């Protein structure tokens, strides 16, 4: 269902050939060939068997709305830029291409396809190349795979065809979850060069062994969601942002030498400059304190959706759903949405009150105070 | 009147649930409806969810519709208000394809249609090229969506003369890539890129102007509205910025022949 939607949407962007001419955009900066600034702050790593020498901090372009930020980053020496066919319905690739056109030989571009089969994926690639204004991309990811089965022979073959045609240099796969299945499958396929994974301080060491295996197998590992992804915009993360801990979160990722590069999202120069400065900096004890304090703050409420609690409530409550509903109200200020979802549950679920149990059978391995949070949901919505 | 009320109420209730495949004869729902909110939209579209959250996404209801071998994937996103919904639409439309006046606006390409009306952003993806059917579906959906079909007020502030069609966008964060310009609109002209940012008060807008002067450097005062300056920046090109009350605006990337002050003053004139 998911890949189907993504591929549909991306497919829908394919316009008649007459419409594909790049429009003139007055806002597209012409990038002068002036020397990059602050080059001494750049640190490089080798991205696995690709042999690419990449800056340890790259640029996730997905939510960037002004090409000038991307252009400035390229001028500063950042050489890894990430986009996808589906971002902003294709508008993102067009902006990235326009911003980096004059720097193409100095930088690496990765993009992604959600194509459901070989033909569709290859059609996406051709559109991506047109929109990016380039003959090739450095890494072409199969977008958002969660299971080994989604790495189909058909899609892997599409990548090999694209490689032979010189349209891509390296094949990749991206994943937001399912790392324990997809990374081994990528290694075993022998056809994947780079994995793009979500990786941040909330995960602790849970992925380190897998990442090590990928590195040992020669795969380049790129980290995304380095600042805890979707949690970024919740109220708790506003606190994180104020305390400057976003850069601590980036340094936490960079301290893992098996990570080739990172792609934090950036919308403005202030964010870029803060992230840029992280490259040569060590993860400090102060960073550790900041992130530990943040984890302690969010752990009682932050559900990682790992589903380890499924089926453990003696009264049969859908624990992770209820935690999500209360987060709508408390984390996102969407009380009515939380109540709406709660009231959609069966009567025998909404009638349960945690206070009726003398003890709770649900123990969250990440420290969420489940009974307390679900009691809050029952109090708010029941 | 009572009938009308009932109809609107029904339409509103309908949006709190899944879109209706039966809007067009011969189409039926395939599989269960889906619903996502801000913290689990990632389950549906992975990283692309961040693009929705930027525009103050509240929730999404979606269905797959089937007619014979053809499939439509229909998703209705509710944003916090009509302005954010328009922003979402504008960031997802293809600026090279004209918009249609359906709902607030719509855009139909061979295998995809998007629509905005009030605080709702609709996406329809088709398994094959069928723009006529997509147009019919979008028209039917627009009728059922309650609320206003008016464009956001700020769009009327941009001079219409030589405005590049489809170029107006709501930038949700960091207009021009500058954090001090929190959110606002941009529009393109053959001679440069215009922007408008509304602050909470004239005082806070004046503070932002000071930050801009400091950030850009080498500014020269100009007489436009309450205050203004001109400058040249390596990335933003030749530019001219003004403040009018609590609104900051200006032109960047100005072409060599453009009259920076006169063109920027025209933009300032339109600001209410």
Image (cartoon, grey):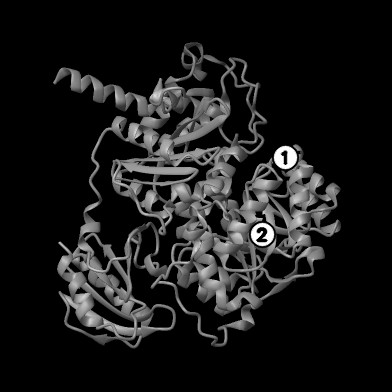
Q: Quadrant of residue A288?
A: bottom right
How many numbered marks, from 0 up?
A: 2
| SS for dot 2 | helix
For residue A347, above or below residue B55: above
| Tag 1–tag 2 contact (CB < 8 Å) | no
Q: Where is residue A203 in the image (x, y as percent from the top left)?
A: 66, 47
Answer whether residue A215 is visible to the viewer in this image.
Answer: yes
Residue bearing mark 2: A253
* Chain letter, disc 2 residue: A
Q: Position of residue A81 (x, y in %)?
A: 60, 66
Q: In the image, which is nearer the foreground, mark 1 or mark 2?
A: 1
- Quadrant where the N terminus of chain B sits is top left
Is residue A57 left or right of A50 when viewed as pictured? left
Q: Quadrant of residue A242?
A: bottom left
Q: Position of residue B96 (x, y in %)?
A: 42, 59
Q: Where is residue B147 in the image (x, y as percent from the top left)?
A: 25, 36
Answer whether residue A199 is visible to the viewer in this image.
Answer: no
Q: Which residue is drawn at 71% across and 73% down?
A: A44
Question: Are callouts 1 and 2 both on one chain?
Answer: yes
- Quadrant where the C terminus of chain B sits is bottom left
| SS for dot 1 | helix
Is residue A258 left or right of B173 when viewed as pictured? right
Q: Nearer the viewer, residue A43 or B87?
A: B87
For residue A147, above or below residue A253: above
Q: Which of A338 and A375 is in front in this view?
A: A338
Q: Which residue is drawn at 55% across and 62% down?
A: A131
* Chain letter, disc 1 residue: A
Q: Quadrant of residue B135?
A: top left
Residue bearing mark 1: A150
Is residue A288 left or right of A173 when viewed as pictured? left
Is residue B214 left or right of A181 when viewed as pictured? left
Q: Residues within 10 Å of mark 1 (few under 14, many from 20)?
A: some
């Amino acid at each position: 269902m998911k890949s189907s939607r993504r591929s549909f949407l991306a497919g829908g962007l394919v316009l008649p050939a007459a419409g594909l001419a790049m429009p003139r955009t007055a806002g597209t900066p012409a990038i002068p060939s002036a020397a990059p600034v602050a080059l001494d702050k750049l640190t490089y790593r080798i991205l696995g068997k690709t042999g690419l020498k990449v800056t340890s901090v790259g640029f996730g372009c997905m939510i960037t709305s002004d090409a000038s930020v991307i252009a400035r980053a390229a001028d500063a020496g950042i050489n890894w830029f990430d986009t996808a066919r589906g971002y902003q319905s294709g508008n993102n690739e067009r902006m990235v291409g326009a911003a980096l056109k004059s720097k193409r030989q100095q930088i690496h571009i990765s993009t992604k396809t959600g194509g459901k089969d070989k033909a569709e994926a290859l059609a996406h690639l051709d559109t991506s190349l047109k929109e990016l204004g380039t003959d090739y991309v450095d890494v072409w990811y199969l977008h958002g795979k969660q299971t080994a089965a989604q790495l189909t022979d058909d899609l892997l073959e599409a990548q090999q065809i694209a490689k032979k045609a010189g349209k891509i240099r390296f094949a990749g796969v991206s994943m937001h979850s399912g790392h324990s299945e997809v990374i081994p499958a990528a290694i075993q396929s022998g056809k994947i060069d780079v994995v793009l994974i979500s990786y941040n301080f909330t995960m602790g060491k849970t992925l380190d062994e897998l990442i090590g295996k990928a590195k040992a197998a020669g795969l380049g590992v790129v980290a995304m969601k380095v600042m805890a992804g979707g949690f970024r915009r919740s109220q708790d993360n506003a606190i994180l942002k104020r305390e400057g801990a976003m850069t601590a979160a980036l340094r936490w990722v960079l301290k893992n030498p098996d990570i080739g590069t990172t792609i934090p999202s950036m919308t403005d120069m202030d964010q870029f400059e803060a992230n840029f400065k992280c490259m040569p900096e060590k993860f400090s004890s102060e960073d550790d304190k900041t992130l530990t304090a943040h984890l302690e703050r969010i752990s009682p409420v932050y559900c990682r959706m790992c589903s380890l609690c499924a089926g453990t409530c003696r009264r049969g409550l859908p624990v992770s759903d209820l935690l999500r509903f209360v987060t709508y109200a408390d984390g996102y200020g969407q009380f009515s949405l939380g109540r709406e979802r709660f009231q959609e549950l069966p009567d025998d679920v909404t009638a349960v009150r945690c206070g009726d149990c003398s003890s709770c059978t649900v123990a969250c391995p990440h420290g969420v105070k489940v009974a307390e949070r679900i009691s809050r949901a029952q109090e708010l919505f029941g | 009147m009572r009938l009308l009320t009932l109809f609107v109420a029904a339409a509103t209730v309908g949006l709190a649930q899944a879109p209706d495949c039966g809007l067009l004869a011969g189409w039926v729902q395939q599989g269960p409806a889906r619903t996502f909110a801000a913290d689990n939209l990632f389950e549906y579209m992975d990283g692309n969810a961040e693009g929705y959250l930027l525009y103050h996404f509240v929730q999404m209801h979606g269905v797959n519709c089937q007619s014979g071998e053809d499939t439509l994937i229909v998703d209705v996103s509710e944003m916090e208000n009509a302005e954010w919904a328009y922003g979402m639409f504008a960031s997802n439309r293809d600026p090279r394809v004209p918009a249609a006046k359906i709902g607030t606006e719509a855009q139909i390409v061979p295998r995809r249609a998007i629509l905005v009306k009030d605080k709702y952003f609709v996406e329809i993806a088709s398994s094959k090229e069928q723009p006529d059917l997509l147009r019919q579906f979008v028209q039917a959906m627009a009728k059922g969506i309650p609320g206003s079909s008016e464009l956001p007020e700020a769009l009327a502030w941009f001079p219409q003369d030589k405005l590049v069609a489809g170029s107006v966008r709501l930038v949700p964060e960091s207009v021009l890539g500058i954090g001090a310009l929190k959110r606002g609109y941009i529009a393109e002209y053959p001679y440069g890129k215009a922007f408008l940012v509304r602050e909470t008060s004239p005082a806070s807008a004046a503070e932002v102007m000071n930050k801009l002067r400091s950030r850009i450097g080498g500014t020269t005062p100009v007489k436009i509205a309450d205050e203004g300056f001109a400058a040249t920046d390596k990335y933003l090109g030749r530019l001219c910025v003004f403040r009018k009350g609590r609104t900051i605006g200006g032109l960047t990337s100005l072409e060599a022949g453009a009259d920076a002050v006169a063109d920027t003053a025209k933009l300032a004139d339109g600001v209410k």
